[in-house]
Image (cartoon, coloured by chain):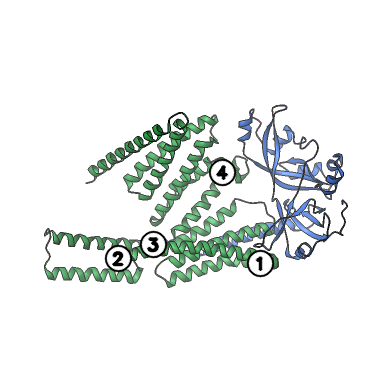
Amino acid sequence: MDDAASRQEAQRRTDRIRAFRAELEQLQRESALELSPEQRDRLDAHLDATLRGLAARFDVDTSEREKQMSWGMRIASTLGALALGAAAVLFFYQFWGLIPIPAQLLVVTAAPLAGMAGARFASRHETTPYFTSLISLVAFAAFVLDLSVLGSIFNLVPTPHALLAWAVFAFALAWRFGLRLVMAAGLVCGMGWVAALLMSFTGAWWAEFGARPETVLAAGLLVLAAPCRRDFASTHRLTGWLAVFLAALFLSFSGDSFLPLEKKTAEKLYQVAGMAGTAAAIWAGIRRQWKETVNLTATFFVIFLFVRLVDWWWDWMPKYLFFFLAGLIAIGLLLAFRGLRGKLKEARP
Amino acid sequence: MRSPLWLAGASVVVANAVALYHGARNQWGPPEAEVEMTEREVRLNYSGEDNSGISLWINWAVYGSGMDWLDPARTAAIGFPGGARDWESANRIPLRAGYVALEYDGASWSAWKPNPASAATSSRLVPVDADADPARLRLRHPDRGRVIILHASFRVYLDARNNTLRAGIARLLPASVSVSPGFRGALTAPLPAGYPRFAVRLAVGRDYEPYVTGVRKLPAAPAAR
C-alpha cells in the first residue's frame, strides 16, 4: 500500500479507536461492561501506544480539534495553490514580452518540472500532504501556462491534445502523492479531451463539444466506469456524476442532441432521463454507502424536479399554490427517503 | 501501486517537443505566402498593464455583396451537412473547421466603391474563398503575395432567399498573431501621428499558421495607404 492509502487507513483506525473509547466510557457508566483495573490499564496502554505510533508515522488527527485544524489546513492549501498559481501566471505575463523567445521557452518548460521536483521534495519531508498538494497544483498551473504560451508564441491552431497532456501530468502527480484535488483536475482535463475527440469524430470543430453535451455525458460515464485506486474512488464518482448530470441538465434545456429527435422531444427525453438517472444514482449510492454520490445526486434530483415544476406550473398557477405544492412534494420526498432508510435498516444483518 | 513520477516529466517533455516541432515546421523554409499589410488590417491588441506581450488582431472585412461566394456548393465543400431545412435545425449545426483565403488589396476591395473616409481607413483584407482543403484553395488563388490562406471556424445559417444552407466565417484560428520581442521596439516606441501608423509583414507557414516577419513604422501622413 502507498503512503496516501496507508495514511487514510491509519486515520480510519484512529477514528475507530476514538469511537471505541467513547463507547467504552458510556458502557462503563451504564454498568453494561466492567473491566478490572489491570485490564483497563493494559487496554489504555495498548491504545495509547497504537495512537502514538500512527501519529508519529502518518501524522493522523487524534482529536476532534486536530481534525478541524486539518480541514483548515486543507482549505488553506487549496487557496494557497490557487493564489500562487495565479501569481506565477501573472508574473510571467508581466515580463514575457521583454525576454527573448528561447528564454521564454526555457522558463515555461522548466516551471512544471521544477514544481514536480518541489512536490517530490515536500512529500519526502512531511508526513501530511498539504504542502505536496499545494506545490503539485502550482506545477499543474505552470504546465497549463507552458502549453498556452507555446501556442501563443508560434500562433498554433488550438488542439484538444493539450488537454490530454495536462490530464496525464495531473494523473501521474495525483497517483504518486495521493492527491484528490489534483486527480479531479486531471479527470476534468481527461473528460474535456474525450468530449473534444468525440466532437471531432463527427466532423465538427473540436472546441464545440459544449454545443453537444452528450459528448461530456459520455466522458463522465467513462470516468465512472474506469477502474481506479480505492482512495480515488470517491473523486472519480464525484467528477463523473457531476459531468453526467450537468450534461443532462443542459440537454433538458437545449435539446442539442445527436439523437435523431425533434428538439422538444430530446428536451423531454433528458428531463425524464435526468430525474430517473438521479433517482437511480441515489439508490445505488445508498446501497453501496457512497456518501458523496448520494449528496451530489440528491442535489441534482432536487434541481431537476424544481426546474420541471417551474416549467410546468409557474406561469399559470397562483404563486402561493405553486409553493404549497412544492412544499407538499418536499414532504413526500422526505417520507419516501424515510421509508427507504427503514428498508435499509431491515436489510442490515 | 505508485505511478512513476517520470510519467509526469515525460508528459511535459513530449508535449513541449511536439509543440516546438510543430511551430518550427510551420516556419521552416520559405513561407507559403507573405504579404505586407498596414495597421488597417493588423491592429494592436490591447493587452493592459499586466501583459508585456504584443499581439496583432487580423482585421478582415466584408463589403458589397458580402460573402455571396460562400454558396451552397462551397458550404458543402467545408463539410456541412445539407439536410437542414428550417432555421432552428440549421442553427443547431455546430461549427466546423476549414480554411479561408483572404485577399489583400485585390479585386474584391477594388470592386467596392467606398466613400473617401472609409477608403482611407477600412481593412483591405477580404475573404474570397473557403474550402476544407488548403491545397485546392491555393490552386484557385495562386498569388502568394496577395492571398493568404488561414485556418478558420465556420458556422452555418439558413439563407431565407432560397432556403439553402450557407456558411459564414465564425473566426480565424488563431484570430491574433504574437509579435516576437525582436519586433517589439517598432510597436512600443512612440508611433507617428495619423493612420495607419505601421506596416507588418505577415507570413503564413506550411501548416497555414501565421507569423510576423517584419514591422516598420510608416511616415506620419493622414492620407490613405
Q: Secondary structure at mark 1?
A: helix
Which amino acid lies under the numbered mark 1 shown in the image of this protein?
Answer: Phe
Q: Are marks 4 and 3 in contact (CB under 8 Å)?
A: no
Q: Secondary structure at mark 2?
A: loop
Chain that bears disc 1: A
**Marks 1/4: CA–CA distance:** 34 Å
From what the image shows, is residue B126 above or below residue B220?
above
Q: Main secondary structure of the magenta part?
A: loop
Palette colour of chain A: green
The circle drawn on residue A95 is 1
Residue underneath mark 2: A63
From what the image shows, is residue A306 above or below residue A173?
above
Mark 3 or mark 1, which has the lower sequence index? 3
At horizontal 48% and vertical 62% (from top left) the residue drawn is A79
Q: Which residues are magenta?
A: B80-85
**Percent position (x, y) of residue A282?**
36, 43
Answer with the quarter of the image where residue B76 lies. Answer: top right
